[in-house]
Image: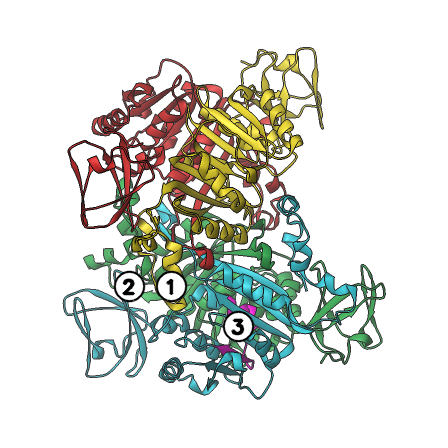
Chain colours: A green, B cyan, C yellow, D red
Amino acid sequence: MIHDGDTALVIDNAGKEHLVIVGAGRKFETHHGFILYDAMIGREWGSIIYSSLGHPYLVVPPSTADLIRHIKRSSQVIFPKDSAYILMRLNIKPGMRVLESGCGSGGLTLALAQAVMPTGMVYSQEIREDFLALTRRNMQRVDLDSYVTFILGDATQGFKVNEPVDAVFIDLPAPQTCLAQARAILKNGGFFGSLVPTTNQVQDILRAMDAMGQEGFGLVEVEEILLRGYKPVADRLRPRDRMVAHTGYLIFARAVIKPAPLSSRSTLLSENAAEATKNDSDAMEQADEQDHTTEHDF
Amino acid sequence: MIHDGDTALVIDNAGKEHLVIVGAGRKFETHHGFILYDAMIGREWGSIIYSSLGHPYLVVPPSTADLIRHIKRSSQVIFPKDSAYILMRLNIKPGMRVLESGCGSGGLTLALAQAVMPTGMVYSQEIREDFLALTRRNMQRVDLDSYVTFILGDATQGFKVNEPVDAVFIDLPAPQTCLAQARAILKNGGFFGSLVPTTNQVQDILRAMDAMGQEGFGLVEVEEILLRGYKPVADRLRPRDRMVAHTGYLIFARAVIKPAPLSSRSTLLSENAAEATKNDSDAMEQADEQDHTTEHDF
Amino acid sequence: MIHDGDTALVIDNAGKEHLVIVGAGRKFETHHGFILYDAMIGREWGSIIYSSLGHPYLVVPPSTADLIRHIKRSSQVIFPKDSAYILMRLNIKPGMRVLESGCGSGGLTLALAQAVMPTGMVYSQEIREDFLALTRRNMQRVDLDSYVTFILGDATQGFKVNEPVDAVFIDLPAPQTCLAQARAILKNGGFFGSLVPTTNQVQDILRAMDAMGQEGFGLVEVEEILLRGYKPVADRLRPRDRMVAHTGYLIFARAVIKPAPLSSRSTLLSENAAEATKNDSDAMEQADEQDHTTEHDF
Amino acid sequence: MIHDGDTALVIDNAGKEHLVIVGAGRKFETHHGFILYDAMIGREWGSIIYSSLGHPYLVVPPSTADLIRHIKRSSQVIFPKDSAYILMRLNIKPGMRVLESGCGSGGLTLALAQAVMPTGMVYSQEIREDFLALTRRNMQRVDLDSYVTFILGDATQGFKVNEPVDAVFIDLPAPQTCLAQARAILKNGGFFGSLVPTTNQVQDILRAMDAMGQEGFGLVEVEEILLRGYKPVADRLRPRDRMVAHTGYLIFARAVIKPAPLSSRSTLLSENAAEATKNDSDAMEQADEQDHTTEHDF
């Protein structure tokens, strides 16, 4: 049942969403008349409520993804398709310690905090005070700020965390400048992730990972997640006409300890190094025989 | 540090993975010699350990996704790209109550249990005793069975749950046969999800949802998640040659209460009904103007 | 060199295109001033010409695809990514005879005529006089009308062609209603193609093909072509943010003669029949082992 | 009807294809018995013919794409999905002059020759004698060698063509090393295309194009073509399980004449230069507003 003080997602017939706090005695102004919150209170969630001008509005409790979509933002928010996959790939679960840097507007922070509670902690380091303040306010608004430690600081100078973390996520323009810093606070075997929009940045990160010493990264994977929506019409089922074609490239890796480089074995550890020795036609003709298995190179 | 009794993921240079339990005094047989577990114990996670024949093996702690990939299976397991997105779309988080049916081999069960712990509960209903038994064993193996209630039963006869649940996921060949049953145990405003491999099944589900009475589903969305992998090579960055092109269509909806059908307003509530009246060329030419927003029809 | 009377594509800095006929003594009005055609005449193709207000305009000769994009249209035009693939799959080349129905605004007609000239012929049958007239005008405008025979007629009543054709393309809302008619005018072994926007229409066509007698279709394939564009920026190379996610499903087949149905062999000839006997989990678990080869079922 | 001496595509029930020349008195050996060619002669194309062991074989005339798939190859062949799109983007049609370099095994050569005949010409320049010889033999085999001029030569030393060409296609590992050479033989306004497997190569080409002088390239586009196949089963319509995820990046451009660089206008001509000045968040947040139109930058 809808109660006074609840956070509600109100959606009109055209799909336009409004995130509101139900307030007895107040009213919600729409483009097509208003709705008295008192008309919502006591009704079942999932009900359709009509505005003063007779337009239908569906009222549902917001999901975490809905909240993220509606947080106040000062920058690009990571898309739900990506943040869902990031949480899975970084093995985020109740009790985990995870560092993210930067925090943006707190979209991923919110998803992380929701997933590590009640016993875990999100460390959120950010160089810009305004972004950090906005993220803090956004977390307070959804009562998740007690699961986040807000840290003002430059990632290239290191991460101000007093305990090793299970996972690190870097959402910065030049992740290659703070890979060693990320590795330093990661538990051995821990999970690394990053998201960058361009192929050039992916190349920079891969090159920097290759150049790291014994304490480095392995099992490196570069991936994209694409979401294709369909028109949900039984007799005319077909994909939507347009889709988001690109949000970013995802890079994932594990914190590993490589053997001493004097061994010739070290050349075995890098797909990059191995591949670099192949000539073009080889690389083209070679089938991806191991595509069916999880293909790893460390 | 790696301890006796730990579960470890051991990965060879070709990406082949083995999920093992570290056992003092025993050894792990590989295709290229053996490794004494005693040689692992006391080493750092993320270390590379050489077999008796000198082959390198990386040892890392498994993620939940790693565990799912390695559970004993009797049927198709939902892919990580899909299960990650399902968890997000169903708003799974610590403390939630969620029903899944069927349970398959427990792949999604494991992900759900991991996400709702320590205060939530997964109800897993399955018509086949052998599948249910396998899922129970798989959950016991990873110490998550206390977060799962195992239910033997036919979904078309209703779900044997004594409390309303926050979310329902249907992984059955004919989800349209148990939509009303799913709706009956869902909280109003709750989250519904399903995965089916064919377009015909999607059509069947949409048609059945259209035919439901006042207690039905709204905000219906049909989606696909595609994962594209890249060769992680800085100087030759490019997509892998082949990819998984299809695992299934995802259907998501919210449990809603529709207004009484005497009102002409009810026609507003279905994109299906609305779209059905358009002629072909209209449907083709009409741009997806609302594609940029979350487009909903309820 | 640009001559009086040439057809030219004039493109502004924002990518906006104008298809013009260069006319001595006249001028081309832009949003940012005008350009005298006399200033174009005698200049090299590929030159940049400035408008009276100093805006740069690139002038190039239009390709066939450019012409199609700019023909006067009364209906949806088949996208270049699709028409290019259709021409290849229907084996269109100089000298071929091909029937299309309907003609729409003549977009595909233009591409077909350009490809079969100087010795081939496009038969374009259409039930609507206005569409046929528009297509004729569009072909006249680009001097290709002598390679097209314009036929007014209902496809379900048969195709009014006096010779067997090498290929047939059906661009109608219900292709299943004229499959036998298409087969009747196709040479044995000839090429069939169709494009429909919905999965339901694909199912209808496949079902109708299955129901045909000995003179039917084989080697049936259903495909989609997706085009992903990139921002052409060397230091920030990445996909464009959005893309066209769906234009239509393409169905291709060859005109075959099936053996008499008394033989049990006939069951071998249909992937549809074969697949229908599998149960769900089989279909899911079975890997596409033959994906690497051209997988055919007839 | 099938005649002695015809080229035929013979396809078994599993989709395995054989390209054969029908020869009276000889026989075709299959994995499941043999077929006498005399049993094919006089039968209709599209017929199913049974082997001595009773296995059905479909016999159809090969398309150009079928021929390309079966030419003798010494290197990677451009995929049909790509070559179809390349022909369209390069505006290949009867009568055109087009240069390609290198020729590989002649797959694209065959498609080009088929499309420009009977009045056009394909210039095929290749540095390796063995590749050129193989391409010549492959063209002779399909009677298209009279539409191809075979040129032995290093692309970086220039293209040995005595007339300006309408289009150039570069299929070499380092296209950036012969861009000026390609521009030199292209008609002003002409069509340029290239295919490379890696993002690094795309960046190299874009960078080299940016560095060219007044006679350069404009309307640069980078694109990928993806082909998704479906199982053609009416009651279980769904995508195939796996697909080819990457063949190459396609780069297209037009030969343009840029204004003298003293003008500040020149900065308008490059999306590359313009974009480079944007900061990261801008680039991320900016919607692709012009995605709906053909977005060009010259």
**Residues rendered magenta in the picture:** B85-101
Residue in the picture at 27% in, 58% down: A269
The stretch drawn in magenta includes residue D185: no
Kind of residue at disc 1:
Thr
Q: Position of residue C199 (x, y in %)?
A: 52, 53
Residue in the picture at 61% in, 28% down: C135
- Left or right placement of residue D123 versus residue C208 in this view: left
Query: Tag on residue A258?
Result: 2
Kindly identify which chain the residue marked by label 2 belongs to.
Answer: A
Viewer-nearest residue: A146 or D269: D269
Give the secondary structure at mark 3: strand
Dot 2 crowding, Cα within 10 Å, few <14, some 14–19, many 20+? many
Q: Which residue is mark 1?
A: C277
Dot 3 crowding, Cα within 10 Å, few <14, some 14–19, many 20+? many
Q: Position of residue D151 (x, y in %)?
A: 28, 20
Label 1 in the same subunit as label 2: no
How many marks are shown on the rendered structure?
A: 3
Inter-mark Cα distance, 3 to 1: 52 Å
